[in-house]
Amino acid sequence: MTHPFPEWPYPKLIAHRGAGRQAPENTLAAVRLGAARGFRMMEYDVKLSADDVPILLHDDTLERTSNGSAAAAALRYAELARYDFGSWHSAPYAGEPLATLYSIAAYTRANNVHSNIEIKPSPGLEDHSGERIARLAAQLWAGAALPPLLSSFSEIALAAAGDAAPEVPRALLIAKELPPDWRERAARLSCCALNLNHTYVTAEIVRQVRDAGLNLATWTVNEAGRARELLRWGCNAIITDEVETMAPGQF
């Protein structure tokens, strides 16, 4: 199998949803805090508003991470911008605005921070989300030393992303056990990596994935001992919530 990156060009440690425990997840504040803790790569979720603005949000609805109560895909960006995306976390972040891919691209590029953009399509928008987000990633990171890595659980979104911007590398996210046809799926999508749930990762799985010519990132690893074990087995990167206790300099 051939792909753009035979060797992993990104950092070994990736902050999950920015510093998504210590600050409101998927916000510019979280990305800034992760960078302040020494992380040079961030993972964050991107979906589309009703008027096609790429917004950072994990859930399909606003309830968990804002004071809103609607489906994100049903609202235009101007409507989404009315909501507070910080108070749910803690008082110091009250008033934190909804982040967009535009603001995150500007910050990360200016501060030499790399990105794993998880395409998180709202229901029924898999094709369109993959295409739109991939095209924007290619535009916003044009001329960057490294492009962002696009990942998704949605194979429809990844296929659309590959058609829209084949030069932007892609990773297939798998939630549980590695399926028997993982090689065929990764090849069909021209992925350079798998992003696997570390709970299901063994040394033998790492060997198989790496022998297949694929890179391997694992999520969400919050214990230093487990992170070291996975890296020792040959995983290329660890995605973690623990930006305070798992500093990049330790690995």
Image (spheres, rainbow, N blue to C red):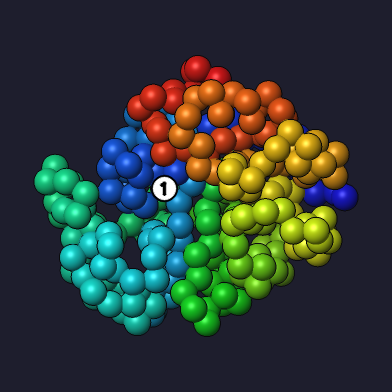
Residue 66 seen in the figure: yes
* Rendered position, 16 above or below 51: above
Q: Residues within 10 Å of mark 1 (few under 14, many from 20)?
A: many
Camera-side residue of 37 and 153: 153
Q: Which residue is mark 1?
A: 17
Picture coordinates of residue 155, whole percent (x, y): 66, 68
Residue drawn 29% across the image and 68% down it: 62
Camera-side residue of 107 and 69: 69
Camera-side residue of 163 and 68: 68
Q: Amino acid at mark 1?
A: Arg
Q: Does residue 222 appear left or right of residue 141 in this picture?
A: left
Furthest-left residue in view?
A: 91
Picture coordinates of residue 105, whole percent (x, y): 45, 50
Q: Does residue 71 appear left or right of residue 186 in this picture?
A: left
Residue drawn 78% across the image and 37% down it: 204
Looking at the rendering, which quadrant does residue 5 occupy?
A: top right
Q: Does dot 1 land on a helix, a strand or a loop?
A: loop
Looking at the rendering, which quadrant does residue 183 occupy?
A: bottom right
